[in-house]
Image: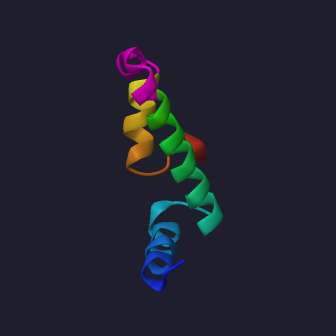
Amino acid sequence: MPKSLEEFARSRVRFGGYGSISEYLRELIRIDQRFEIAKREPELINSAELLPTLATNRFGPSKDKYR
């Protein structure tokens, strides 16, 4: 991983509520999977369940995760 990306990932761990770089990368992969599903099945994007999940996870870890 290029140093600039590693530094960015470390800052997300420090300030974004992730426990490790691995946890951050796993979350990014899950987000990408959700977007891929939504692209293949456009009707899901309007789903009351999926849309809040995409919006919440797109911008950082879910606050519910830490309750």
Q: Position of residue 6 (x, y in %)?
A: 51, 78
* Above or below: residue 50 compared with residue 11: above
Q: Which residue is rendered at x = 51% and y = 75% of the image? A: 10
The residues colored magenta run 38-49
Residue at the (56%, 59%) spot, across then down: 24
Looking at the picture, does residue 32 appear above or below residue 38?
Answer: below
Q: Quadrant of the C terminus?
A: top right
Give the x, y percent position of residue 27: 56, 50
Q: How many marks?
A: 0
19 and 39: which one is in front?
A: 39
Q: Is residue 49 left or right of residue 19?
A: left
Q: Is residue 45 above or below residue 60?
A: above
Identify the coloring: rainbow
Q: Is residue 66 visible?
A: yes
Relative horizontal placement of residue 61, taking residue 43 as reference (left or right): right
Res 30 quadrant in image = top right
View extreme (bottom): residue: 3
Residue at 39%, 26% in the rendered image: 51
Q: What residue sits 45% from the left and 74% below the top?
A: 11
Judge whether residue 67 can be spotted in this image. no
Q: Is residue 40 above or below residue 59?
A: above
Classify the position of the N terminus by image quarter: bottom right
The overriding secondary structure of the stretch rendered in magenta is helix
Q: Position of residue 28 (x, y in %)?
A: 51, 52
Does the segment drawn in magenta span residue 16? no
How far across and down, in percent of the image, does residue 5 sit? Answer: 45, 75
